[in-house]
Image (spheres, rainbow, N blue to C red):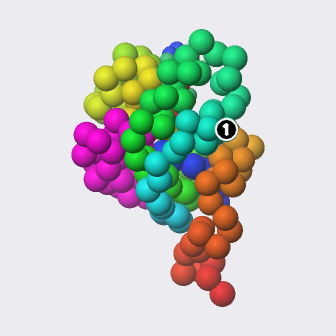
Amino acid sequence: MERTLSIIKPDGVSRGLIGDVIKRFEGAGFRIAAMKMIYLSKKEAEGFYAVHRERPFFQSLTDFMSSGPILIMVLEGEDVIQHNRELMGATNYKEAKPGTIRADFATDIEKNIVHGSDAPETAATEIAYFFNSLEIVGSIEQNP
Ligand code: CMP
């Protein structure tokens, strides 16, 4: 069983797309193991996206990610990291397959509605950036 971090970005929250996105996650069989709404400071957004700090879009991306509330979730399931990436579609919505979240809702390469971890190591780091172990809820089978 694998876990991944999912973010509904400020554009997804402000456009009223939380329900649509979560419906796709639940429809895909993902279990939501943790969820909270937060409003990142610029510094917190910079910390989260530190791997991109040399990229030309870093300032704009971190301004955007601290421009409004975001919904963060820990999703759990078999092969959930890759499966979530397939549901989201390509980073650039113009290259995303029809029926994916980004193809259906994104308006911009930056304002692309959702973020999802890209590998097990990044998933672990990203989950730990936002959630402590008590905030990640086990399923019935996992709860002693
Ligand atoms: P995300 O999956 O959150 O990971 C990094 C983010 O940077 C990405 O989604 C986009 O929002 C943004 N991003 C990636 N590439 C570009 C780019 N070429 N121009 C602007 N923003 C980008």
The structure residue drawn at horizontal position 67% and vertical position 51%, both measured from the top left corner, is 129
Q: Nearer the viewer, residue 57 or 40?
A: 40
Q: Is residue 135 above or below residue 14?
A: below
Give the x, y percent position of residue 112.
40, 29
Q: Residue furthest right?
A: 121
In this rendering, the answer to whether 111 lies above or below 74 is above
How crowded pointer 1 is (Cα within 10 Å; few <14, some 14-19, many 20+) is rated as some
Which quadrant of the structure image shows residue 11? top left
Dominant SS in magenta? helix
Magenta stretch: includes residue 11: yes
In the image, residue 136 above or below residue 40: below
Q: Residue at x 65, y 46 (%)?
A: 126
Residue 101 in sight here: no
Q: Which residue is mark 1?
A: 47
The correct choice, above or below, for 111 with respect to 38 in the image is above
Which residue corresponds to the image point at 74% horizontal and 43% vertical from the top-left?
121
Where residue 95 appears, as percent x and y from the top left, is: 41, 17
Q: Residue at x 39, y 41 (%)?
A: 68
Q: Which region shows up in magenta?
A: 8-29
Badge 1 amino acid: Gly
